Amino acid sequence: MRNVTRRYGWELLLVVLIGLAGIWSSTLSPYFLDPVNLLSSAQFFVIFSLMAFGLFPIVVQGEIDISLASTLAVGSVLFGQLSVAGVPLVMALPVVLGACAILGAVNGFLVAYAGLPSLAVTLGTLGAYRGLAYILAGDVGVTGITPDYLQLASTWVGIVPLAVVMVLVVAVFFWLLMARTAFGRYSYAIGNSAGASLMAGVPVPRTRVLAYTLAGAMAGLAGLVWVSQYQSARGDNADGSILFVLTAVVLGGVSIKGGSGRALGVLLAIILLGTIQTGMKLANVPGTSQTLVIGALLVGSIGIPRSIQLFRQKFGRNKPRASVRPAATVA
Amino acid sequence: MTSTSTDQPRKTLPARLGLSGGAAALKVRFIGVIVFLALLGIAFSALTPRFATLDNGRSILFTAAILAVAAVGQAIVVLTGNLDLSVGAIMGMAAYVIYDIAGQNPVLQPYVVVLAILLGAILGAFNGFLVAVLQIPSIVATLGTLSIYRGFVSFYANATEVTSGQLPPWMRMLATASWFGLPAYVWVALAIVITTAVALRVLPWGRKIYAYGSNPKAARFFGLNSTRIIIGAYVAAGIIAAIAGLLLGAQVGNINSLLASGFEMQVLAAVVIGGVSIWGGSGSVYGAAVGAIVLATINNGLVLLQVQEYYRLLIQGAAIVAAVAVDALVQRRIHSATTRRRIMEVVE
Amino acid sequence: MFTLTRQSSRRIGAAALAVVAGIVLAACSSTAPTSNSAGSTADANSLKIFMAPKFTGLAYFEVARVGGEQAAEDVGFEFQYIGSDKPEATEQIATITNAIPQKPSALVVSAIDGDAVAPSLKQARDAGIKVVTYDADAAVDSRDLFINQLSYQLAAETMLDAALLNSPDGGQVAFISASPTAPNHTAHVKIMKELIDSDERYSSLSYIDTVQFAGDDATKSQEIALNLIQANPDLKVIISSSAVSAPAAQQAIINAGKTGQVFATGFALPSSVSDFIESGASKAFALWDPAELGYVATVAAYQLATGEITAEEGQVIDAGKAGKYTVGKDGEVLYDKPLMFTADNIADYDF
């Protein structure tokens, strides 16, 4: 039992926080505890979840991709254009996913084979892909998307929106991918030490490119959901949402230094953020307080456990201060 | 991660290999940015006669001035191997809060810079505390403070504006003044760039920043106090960002709570184009300043050529990728003997 | 690379996927489930109306909010101002989605992306909530009424009139828009170009074809204004229908020392341009009264909720002291009261 609490400590903390947030939200607003409303609010977080799961293996590998929201925009605009051009849905899906996967792969190649810093590369492609989306969308964006392209958002499984089911399937997929496959093992190894992994025969560049390609495809999938939910395909789709995505991944216990983190944590983090945001929105909390709360949550959730740990080290037991700090462990 | 305060997974990369080689790379890289700027200038001059005029040069420098100041602050933090994503929020908070207070208490108007230094130091110290003491990875910590600082400004502002009439007259004069043929802002920016560069070079604190950034482990081994170095870097960056905020506020005139939101991307772009290694330890504040001028030149040239906004995004993005690619190439040449590792060779 | 390391997990994964797929196929439907929580009926005494601006934190929307609050006070209903402080479509969609279960009688919305928010507005209408847009419209079938501050035509004419007040001899004008996806800005520019091409009154003007986009960002507006001045030595007037860009451009002109040679104009709050007009740097800016616009939109929402009007063409909205307005085609109501701020009257406005 102790082992479980230790190993899944972060996830347990998230579950507790979700519980607290749920109680808080239901006191804030009487409308919170309605399953239908909750599920329809959940729908809103699908797009961020898909991008967060895409980003997850990249962060585990110790890299980052801030261009995903721009990739989403390319995907949504392309999807819109294909719809207007009368391309059948079954053909449009692979085209969009493929195109976005290629955009992801470009990031991957620049990072893995050219050895460029991922933050700088994806800062560049963040702008470049956004420009591409605007060029594809034209001046006013794509309008007149045909109904068959919108099915994803207008299908329910019982009372659960299909898109929410999709997120659960994606979560399971990423859990298996990271916990049970060679790709997953390689990713954690690379995140802990890329150099050592290389020596040990891990195909480092290939694994990296694969992670970026997968992330691109996930952003493309998010683009499909975007179009079906919002019937809008414009160059500025999802602009600025990468901060929320990154917040979800980090809050999920995925160390931004690489090497640790689990799919379950990412899912729980999204549920936590979703609970808080939905609660505050239902209670019509002013927007400024919402921004403050999310920021404080991000800093506090990592900072408070860390300061307790530091406090204990300093005053709890009079251990002599080591010259090298103990390695920080997030998860 | 590429931007952490502690053990970096990428120790094998050229950026980590000693100071002397790094210094050589730095020089080559700086010349590289200048050459790139010159090529841009030549290209735009060939394409439009309106580009190569004195007046246009002035206006490029004027637009670049504030970005250059902010980039210099960011460069200090990046040199330690960290990031400051809250730079835009600090700028916005300094501009709104300080001008609002000074607008209501005219006695304080001569001292807005002092207030900015104070506020910037506090905000920067908080960032530094999170990164150095609590050891929260900088990208996460400053992402959080970005929301907190920005949330505070909109809370404080309550959807009102500070209008240009409320600004201290001397700051408004500074925004429009011209000294020795150049806008006053350009001189102010130049002064801040040079002061920072000299401080980094002369003060022990500055040398420690380079030492720490190029190899945090070794620096700690030799007894450098990493906590103090990182907090110092963030405090300096916070102060510089707050001053940049004052300058921006006076330039814009009407200040709302959204001022400078998203500015962090521009600042990071300037720093990266200017050849400051995102892995820390290598690069110069001059480079960062020139990076700001490169961005301003691209924007200016494209408006002169009547190019649509979409292409500007595309070209800026490509410029960033090209800049880091050149970085990697230059550093690889210099350390060719030591960096022939499989991971790097595949591309060649 | 995706090879599974353990045989058993492959089976677990396959089984999980099969179960999920089975459930999904068995239970798929294409009708939205409805909440069974008790909803309030449109009782005039317990009416509540929510106003959602594009995003909170902009002075312009704050003025409109005051109008809405005034309407609530005059007529007597509950009024709430909701929204996120982030200028993002997803945020506004979340705001609207979460407003629905609170069962307001009506929503008064300025759409940040008219297409993207449409599905959530339709959802609101399906739940029996009346939807009125003001300032920026959403897709026609997603709202009952659109209170249009100025018809695109009148807006374009007003801005060109303001340009001529600044530069009576005409000359070259340039346009700064918020974004290529802002439909009202795009339409304004298009009509202004047509007017300059065809209308006698504006024949002394000429224009630069390329439109620049500043995304309602003051810093970027200034940079673009400065670059436009550099690029076009004959430039006389910079026009923007963004209340952020227009004053920022004027400030950029002052900063560049071009006061009196180049002018900025367009739509702006009087408080943000009073310094320019009082100092003579600019002769005229235009707008409408956002408070009255908010008032009319909120009153219209109230009358829809009580059933006094049904948004049919030809019906009249009586907004008391704010005037009477007739519903036009496609539920569009023209407010159409432009204000021109000049040195003579700028002191009279306090917003």
Image (cartoon, rainbow, N blue to C red):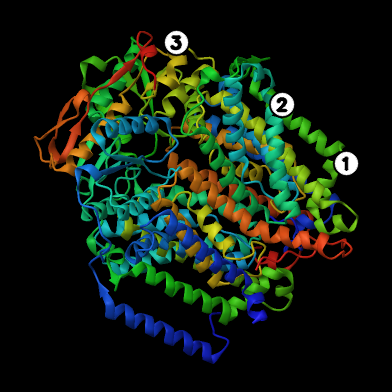
Q: Which residue is mark 2?
A: B114
Q: Is residue B131 above or below residue C302?
A: below
Question: Quick one: A64 or C327, which is closer to the camera?
Answer: C327
Pinpoint the chain carrying mark 1.
Answer: B
- Which residue is at 72% across, 43% downward? B125
Q: Quadrant of the C terminus of chain A?
A: bottom right
> Is C328 left, or right, of C58 in this rendering?
left
Q: Is residue C119 above or below residue B123?
A: below
Q: Position of residue C51 (x, y in %)?
A: 32, 40
Counting residues from the N terminus, which is met first, the one under dot 1 or under dot 2? 2
Q: Which residue is mark 3?
A: C278
Same subunit: marks 1 and 2: yes
Q: Position of residue A28 (x, y in %)?
A: 43, 54
Mark sitting on residue B204: 1
> Is A132 left, or right, of A199 in this rendering?
left
Q: Secondary structure at mark 3?
A: helix
- Outermost residue, front direction? C45
Q: Amino acid at mark 2?
A: Val
Which of the two marks, 1 or 3, is nearer to us in this view?
3
Question: Quick one: C188 or C119, which is closer to the camera?
Answer: C119
Mark 3 and 2 residues: CB-CB less than 8 Å, in contact?
no
Q: Is residue C39 above or below residue C210?
A: below
Between marks 1 and 3, how big is the CA–CA gap? 52 Å
